[in-house]
């Protein structure tokens, strides 16, 4: 290709300004050769330069069409489809779509079947990038059908392959959110590539690696982590043999693959390998060439997030904190240009950093970070409530906990109230998981109210949480809810005891008797030592504080004599 490129300055004068002389066709062929190199071991020129050469070839072909030169329609159709490919690589998706459609509709052109298939493929990819997935799926299926109609042995290295069309079909399905279907098509593509002769496998090595890497990502989304590790490990070995100098596009693919592989290794409990892979992903992302990623740094943010998670799993908390601090700075920079995409990631990172502050006894810093996280989620909810309201509720609950630990009980109650209100509103569509989450948020609010000395309010929260969890245990497997139920009952015993004490101190003996009755009823349904001990102690304090007034109030309220014991021994 270097020799052909050196001929361009010679061919341009010979061909005339608009290619009207005899050398025009030769100049077009040279431009197409330079813009779309065919040799495996030839490093391509910068993309911007290749797009320029492709545009020059298209302009020359248009001029030839006006002069009705023989073969001009066929050459224009080919120039347009190759230019569509370059525009796709450059991220100019609308222009790529227009070029592919024009290539399909050049008057009097006699395009080959493989060129038609490739043209449909370029159009499908452009439509998918433009979020027109339904049209893209129809078009990519036309491409697959056209490739399958080719005679055996027919090939044009510059115009794709049946495997490339199949991979595009899987990729479009994934962009459309149809991950399970996408994975099935990827698996078909892997089988097709494995059945090819070795010579063709060598030529399609980059495609094969990309298919395996994208398959690993899809399997990760489906939770098929062991299969994802197998596919990702295969892709990792393959991509290591591809020289980045010759295949610069594989560098981003390798970084994304390492991120997916690290998550899947962590999910299969292989934490040391997960950490090492995440660290390699971060290193790869730091060394990506300028312009390899749009926006710059977005892939590094994903890698840092993955690494922070796995450092937490192996209790490397000092390193985790450093990674999270770097991630906060990076996300703040990215959020300036892309708030919709990066403010939510900044919010979740700040919340994770607040957890580190809490663990290190830095309560004020934890609250500040969480408050920033809440504000960012509020802004995200303002743009699109669907995905971010659950996260806003979760972060508000965390803020309630951290304010309570700081002794700011009023703020803790306010944040807990808001978290509970959002969770209640969302719980209807989430079934058992939603009701379990409501119970968790009730316990958080109950603790805040208890510390704010709203004992009756706290008791109401704990009682509702207990009721929800009991209903869930009756409806299904009780295992996941047993610990939450025990925590709610223990907290309820403390809140009722405090409420009874408060009523007696204020002279409200009848209200105290109601609290004591609720506490005694709790012992009948809670086989917990601390609950029973709290009941015994509370009744003893009530008799000491209220004397005969407390006894008479109990008798009026329950119609029973003052208990001499709360529960039977043995």
Image (tube, rainbow, N blue to C red):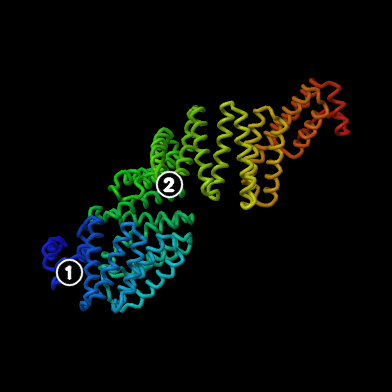
Q: Nearer the viewer, residue 142 or 487?
A: 142
Residue 327's disc is: none
Instruction: Decide if residue 548 is on the left or right side of residue 443.
Output: right
Distance from disc 1 to disc 2, alpha carbons, whole Å, reads 62 Å
SS assignment at label 1: loop
Position of residue 435 relative to residue 359, above or below, is below
Nearer to us in this view, 306 or 150: 150
Q: According to the image, label 2 marks what residue?
A: 270
65 vs 510: above or below: below
Q: Looking at the rendering, which quadrant does residue 246 occupy?
A: bottom left
Residue 270 point in image, percent of width and height:
43, 46
**Based on the displayed image, in which of its 4 quarters is residue 33 positioned?**
bottom left
Question: Where is residue 514 shown, x and y percent of the image?
Answer: 80, 32
Q: Which mark is residue 19?
A: 1
Q: Nearer the viewer, residue 433 or 423?
A: 423
Q: Tell me if residue 483 can be seen.
A: no
Q: Where's residue 76, x and y in %?
A: 26, 71
């Amino acid at each position: 290709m270097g020799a052909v490129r050196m001929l361009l300055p010679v061919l341009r004068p010979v061909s005339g300004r608009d290619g009207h002389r005899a050398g025009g066709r030769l100049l077009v062929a040279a431009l197409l050769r330079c813009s779309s190199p065919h040799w495996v071991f030839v490093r391509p020129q910068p993309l911007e330069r290749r797009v320029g050469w492709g545009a020059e070839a298209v302009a020359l072909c248009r001029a030839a069409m006006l002069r009705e030169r023989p073969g001009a329609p066929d050459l224009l159709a080919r120039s347009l489809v190759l230019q569509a490919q370059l525009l796709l690589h450059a991220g100019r998706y609308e222009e790529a779509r227009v070029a592919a459609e024009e290539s399909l509709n050049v008057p009097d052109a006699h395009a080959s079947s493989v060129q038609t298939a490739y043209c449909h493929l370029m159009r499908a990819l452009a439509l998918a990038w433009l979020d027109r997935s339904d049209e893209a799926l129809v078009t990519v299926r036309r491409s697959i059908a056209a490739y399958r109609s080719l005679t055996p042995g027919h090939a044009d290295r510059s115009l794709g392959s049946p495997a490339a069309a199949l991979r595009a079909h899987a990729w479009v399905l994934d962009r459309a959110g149809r991950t399970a279907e996408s994975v099935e098509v990827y698996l078909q593509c892997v089988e097709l590539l494995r059945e090819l002769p070795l010579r063709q496998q060598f030529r399609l090595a980059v495609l094969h690696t990309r298919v395996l890497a994208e398959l690993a990502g899809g399997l990760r989304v489906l939770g098929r982590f062991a299969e994802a590790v197998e596919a990702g490990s295969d892709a990792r070995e393959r991509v290591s043999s591809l020289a980045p100098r010759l295949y610069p596009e594989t560098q981003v693919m390798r970084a994304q693959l390492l991120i997916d592989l690290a998550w899947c290794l962590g999910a299969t409990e292989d934490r040391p390998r997960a950490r090492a892979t995440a660290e390699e992903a971060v290193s790869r992302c730091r060394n990506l060439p300028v312009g390899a990623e749009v926006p710059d740094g977005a892939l590094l943010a994903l890698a840092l997030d993955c690494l922070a998670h796995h450092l937490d799993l192996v209790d490397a908390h000092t390193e985790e904190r450093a990674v999270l601090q770097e991630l906060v700075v990076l996300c703040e920079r990215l959020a300036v240009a892309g708030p919709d995409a990066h403010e939510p990631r900044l919010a979740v990172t700040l919340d994770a950093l607040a957890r580190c502050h809490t663990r290190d006894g830095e309560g004020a810093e934890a609250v500040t970070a969480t408050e920033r996280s809440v504000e960012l989620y509020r802004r995200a909810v303002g743009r699109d409530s669907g995905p971010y309201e659950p996260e806003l509720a979760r972060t508000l609950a965390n803020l309630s906990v951290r304010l309570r630990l700081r002794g700011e009980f009023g703020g803790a109650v306010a944040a807990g109230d808001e978290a509970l209100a959002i969770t209640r509103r969302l719980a209807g569509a989430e079934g058992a998981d939603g009701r379990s989450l409501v119970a968790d948020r009730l316990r958080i609010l109950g603790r805040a109210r208890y510390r704010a000395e709203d004992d009756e309010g706290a008791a109401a929260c704990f009682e509702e949480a207990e009721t929800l969890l009991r209903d869930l245990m009756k409806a299904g497997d009780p295992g996941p809810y047993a610990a939450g139920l025990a925590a709610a009952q223990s907290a309820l015993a403390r809140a009722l005891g405090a409420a009874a004490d408060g009523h007696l101190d204020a002279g409200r003996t009848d209200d105290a008797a109601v609290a004591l009755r609720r506490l005694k009823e709790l012992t009948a349904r809670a086989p917990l030592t601390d609950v029973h001990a709290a009941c015994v102690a509370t009744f003893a304090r009530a008799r000491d504080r209220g004397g005969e007034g407390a006894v008479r109030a109990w008798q009026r309220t329950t119609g029973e004599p003052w208990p001499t014991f709360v529960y039977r021994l043995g």
